[in-house]
Amino acid sequence: MPRIALKVDVDTLRGTLEGVPALLRMLARRELRATFLFSLGPDHTGRALKRIFRPGFLAKVRRTSVGSNYGLKTLLYGTLLPGPDIGRRAAEPMRASWRAGHEVGVHTWDHVLWQDYVARRDRDWTRRQLQLAVQRFGDIFGRPPEVHGAAGWQMNDHAYELEQELGFSLASDGRGDAPFLPRVGERVLDVPQLPTTLPTLDELIGVDGLHAGNVAEHLLRLSLDGRDHVFTLHAELEGGQLAPVFEQLLQGWQDAGMRLGTLGAYAASLDLRSLPVRRVGMGTVPGRSGSLAVALAAD
């Protein structure tokens, strides 16, 4: 049977303290494992509001109830309120996910900083951000990270190369339709990419008549196509107000006999040596504002 890899992006302090424990309880009831990718440095979520001038961002804010999902306090971090250090304030929920048998990895150091700037930054800037995250991950878990999933699906060529240099064995940094090995310039890298293949709930809700009451049914139809998929959820959403929707998805996938698990388990089912080689670039995805990392045509 096809697989659904469950990738949990944890963006904020609130998501780590509240959303992660909620998701752990939900997954434990079904004896499921997921990959949790953590933001490990300062929570500067409030600075993201400057994206209001980006095409499509304001419409997304309105239809996905950003204020109620993230909370007023979180939306002030980095502006009227200082940005709290997530790794120092919320290390225990991170460790709890590991103790419960879930896969853990790096999402980012500073989510807003990476998402807004990495596409235009040089190798030294990119290395510094990744090293900060890797070091903090080691402080929390006592071992180096093996999995990376870029904040906001934002990358540059240096970041792909640095994943290999820093010892990551698996990444899910962008959007695409199937696993591949990335080519940067003339170099084929060894760190396989398992891109997000399904739309996220916040990309679907509020579009074409979809809402919290019917979006699970729609997403199930998309995912039950006989192919393997990577589904990205967010601790702040599926671990909060959209928890009932995620429960419906899990039930639907289990009823259909889908194998649900981690990115690592998905990678272990593949012949990594035979993966296609694809270049990576920037593109757009319906329901999400701006450009993000996408897999380009196979070589």
Image (cartoon, rainbow, N blue to C red):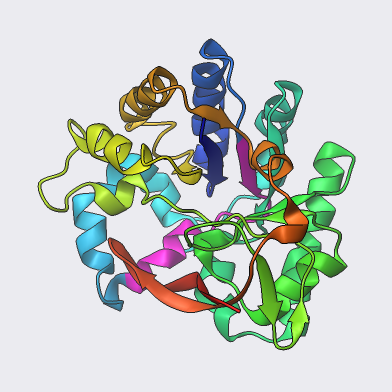
Q: Is residue 39 magenta?
A: yes
Q: Residue at x 49, y 32 (%)?
A: 19
Residue 129 falls in image quadrant:
bottom right
Magenta residues span 35-51
Residue 93 x %, y % = 65, 29
Q: Residue at x 40, y 50 (%)?
A: 198
Q: Residue at x 20, y 63 (%)?
A: 59
Residue 136 x %, y % = 80, 51
Q: How many numbered badges does the structure rendering display? A: 0
Residue 223 x %, y % = 37, 41
Q: Residue at x 82, y 66 (%)?
A: 164
Q: Residue furthest right?
A: 142
Q: Nearer the viewer, residue 118 or 132?
A: 118
Residue 233 relative to residue 180: left or right: left
Q: Is residue 242 magenta?
A: no
Residue 238 falls in image quadrant:
top left
Q: Nearer the viewer, residue 256 or 92?
A: 256
> Residue 17, relative to residue 159: is it above or below?
above
Q: Nearer the viewer, residue 28 or 108?
A: 28
> Residue 85, relative to residue 283: is it above or below?
above
Residue 90 relative to residue 128: left or right: left
> Residue 88, relative to residue 63: is it above or below?
above
Q: Quadrant of the C terminus?
A: bottom right
User: Does residue 243 appear anywhere in the picture?
Assistant: yes
Residue 269 x %, y % = 69, 40
